[in-house]
Amino acid sequence: MRPEINNTENVIERNIGAFASCAEPTKMYAWWTMCCNANMMLAIHKAWDATVRFDNGLAQVNLLLNRVSPWVENRQPPAVRGQGCSQEQAG
């Protein structure tokens, strides 16, 4: 084992903001590698950015997250599945 790579010192601190290559929604393996950190940050930003799109006077909500937008005001919490009561804001 290479001590500069395989060690147990400050594991949590060294992995803040990292993405594991083999994580699953309900479990994590005892071993993992750090993978795609730059790509994941870009992907998360692109998904967040695409939640609300505005084009030619029309606002389109693609994914209902808690996101502030100058074009759409969310008047209901996302707990109501598929029935967010949104209204275009004037001007």
Image (cartoon, rainbow, N blue to C red):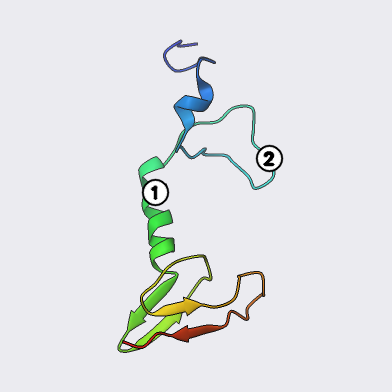
Horizontal side of 88 relative to 65 (left or right) equals left
Q: Position of residue 33 (x, y in %)?
A: 50, 31
* Disc with the residue nearer the chain's start (1 vs 2): 2
Count neighbours of disc 2 (C-alpha within 10 A) and say few if under 14, some if 14 to 19, many if 20 or more. few
Residue to which mark 1 is pinned: 41
Quarter the C terminus occupies = bottom left
Horizontal side of 8 relative to 25 (left or right) equals left
Which quarter of the picture shows residue 4?
A: top left
Count neighbours of disc 1 (C-alpha within 10 A) and say few if under 14, some if 14 to 19, many if 20 or more. few
Q: Nearer the viewer, residue 45 or 76?
A: 76
Q: Position of residue 56 (x, y in %)?
A: 30, 88
Q: Is residue 63 above or below residue 19?
A: below
CA–CA distance in space, label 1 to label 2: 22 Å
Amino acid at dot 2: Lys
Horizontal side of 59 relative to 23 (left or right) equals left
Q: Is residue 84 above or below residue 16?
A: below
Label placed on residue 27: 2
Label placed on residue 29: none
Which quarter of the picture shows residue 44?
A: bottom left
Mark 1 lies on a secondary structure that is helix
The reply to whether dot 1 and dot 2 touch (C-beta < 8 Å) is no
Amino acid at dot 1: Met
Mark 2 lies on a secondary structure that is loop
Q: Position of residue 7 (x, y in %)?
A: 51, 14
Q: Residue at x 48, y 40 (%)?
A: 19
Q: Nearer the viewer, residue 70 or 56?
A: 70
Which residue lies most toward the right here?
A: 26
Q: Nearer the viewer, residue 88 or 27?
A: 88
Q: Residue at x 48, y 30 (%)?
A: 15
Q: Is residue 47 above or below residue 20?
A: below
Count how many numbered circles sit on residues in the image: 2
Q: Residue at x 59, y 41 (%)?
A: 23
